[in-house]
Amino acid sequence: MDIKKLERLHPELGITYLKPQRRVGLIVVLTGYGKGKTSSAVGMVVRACGHGMKVSMIQFMKGDIYTGEWDGIRNLDCDVELIPSGMGFCGIQGNPYPHAVHREAAQQAIRLAREKVESGRYDLIVLDEINNALKLNLVNLEQVLELIRLKPPLMHLVLTGRDAHPDIVALTDTVSEVQEIKHAYRKDIEPQPGIDY
């Protein structure tokens, strides 16, 4: 929806555009064992799209099974790229690839992430499932810390996935932990399109 058009159609809404007095590029961690970390990051991508921001989302653990955000983001009329670079979830859900194959894919993703961060061309970079990749030793702690140190001052950096490392949490501005209260999976309900993938 065109916001200007919305304002003309509904002037009573009193839409306000907030502009911070001081712009800051935030570091955000979305972690925990509940559902919704990637979904939250995709929500930030959609918001950034609405503000005309340039976005890159690199998925460290996804790439072997289709997920709706690939086409959903592609269909946005925005400067947003989504790069699935992983080989799936290492060691679970019947994933057939050995650890070495997962590590090589994650190492390619970390090199790509570094290129994107150092380019200074992006307003927001999302490193989806990078916390999992670190926990599984697919990337090294120092590699992730280096990405954080290289982040340009006005660029936002979002790191998702379970088991966020305490050294990373210590450097972040915002940390949200998604806690599972209930999950359909526990009732033997298969993942559902549009909700789980």
Image (cartoon, rainbow, N blue to C red):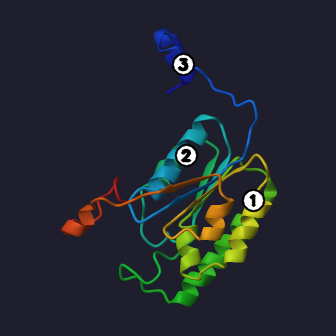
Is mark 1 in CB contact (under 8 Å) with mark 3?
no
In the orientation shown, which residue stands out farthest toward the left? 187
Q: Is residue 142 above or below residue 53?
A: below
196 relative to 15 in the view: left or right: left
89 relative to 24 in the view: left or right: left
| Amino acid at dot 3 | Ile
What residue does disc 3 label?
15
Is mark 1 in CB contact (under 8 Å) with mark 2?
no
Residue at position x 29%, y 64% in the image: 191
Quote the CA–CA distance across marks 3 and 2.
20 Å
Circle 1 residues within 10 Å: few <14, some 14–19, many ≥20: many
What residue does disc 2 label?
44
Residue 195 horizontal/vertical position (percent): 34, 54
Q: Nearer the viewer, residue 122 or 24?
A: 24
What residue does disc 1 label?
117
Q: Nearer the viewer, residue 6 or 28?
A: 28
Residue at position x 42%, y 69% in the image: 65
Q: Earlier in the sequence, mark 3 or mark 2?
A: 3
Q: Is residue 98 above or below residue 11?
A: below
Quote the CA–CA distance across marks 1 and 3.
33 Å
| Amino acid at dot 1 | Val
Residue 39 horizontal/vertical position (percent): 45, 53
Circle 3 residues within 10 Å: few <14, some 14–19, many ≥20: few
Quarter occupied by residue 149: bottom right
| Amino acid at dot 2 | Met
Residue 102 horizontal/vertical position (percent): 55, 82
Q: Is residue 137 above or below residue 171?
A: below
Is mark 3 in CB contact (under 8 Å) with mark 2?
no
